[in-house]
Image (cartoon, rainbow, N blue to C red):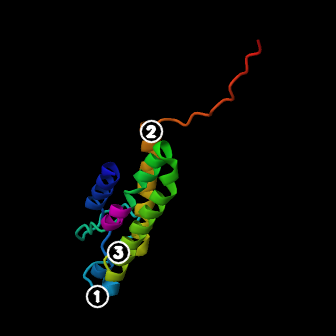
Amino acid sequence: MVASTATIALMKYNSTIHCPNNLLEYGGNFATIELFSFGNSEQAAGKCWPSGHASTGFCLIALFYAARAYAPRWALASLCLALLLGFSFSLAQTARGVHFFSHGLWTALFIWSINILLSCVMLPAKREMLPAKRVHL
């Protein structure tokens, strides 16, 4: 959970994307900068992408992977909780005008990817149960 929220915070700190309420189209002072435009901008960095609030909910996706390895019956409930909280926080920020909903979707994608990678490295691999051999005497 710490790795995913720290990654989102680092990305957000280095982001040039401004929040919707700061854009000219919505009454703000800054021009829109496209997500994957890597040119130099003469305006201040926006530090609005990806969504930090949504990362708080989506970081619980780590519980899903832990549950899959150690308590499989809780895996689905953990995943539903993480997605419900993440999307709720994302919708709340969208309603306030401080994020586009896509910021929350990108956050979910990044956190899910981080958790997949970490689960491959940190969690035990699933072992198939082989049928026991019968010994005939």
On the image, the x and y values in percent for residue 24 come to: 31, 84
Tell me which corner region of the image, top left, top right, bottom left or bottom right, holds residue 22: bottom left
Instruction: Answer whether labels 1 and 3 touch (C-beta < 8 Å).
Output: no
Which region is colored magenta?
50-57
On the image, the x and y values in percent for residue 118 come to: 42, 43
- Residue at image position (43%, 46%) is 66
User: Can you tell which of label 1 and label 2 is closer to the viewer?
Assistant: 2
Tell me which corner region of the image, top left, top right, bottom left or bottom right, holds residue 10: bottom left
Say which label, 1 or 2, has the lower sequence index.
1
Q: Residues within 10 Å of mark 3 (few under 14, many from 20)?
A: many
| SS for dot 1 | loop
Looking at the rendered structure, the kind of residue marked 3 is: His
Residue reaching furthest to the top:
137
Return the residue at label 1: 27
Side of 66 relative to 136 (left or right): left
Q: Tell me how far mark 1 sits from mark 3, CA to CA.
A: 14 Å
Return the residue at label 2: 123
**Residue 51 sits inside the magenta stretch:** yes
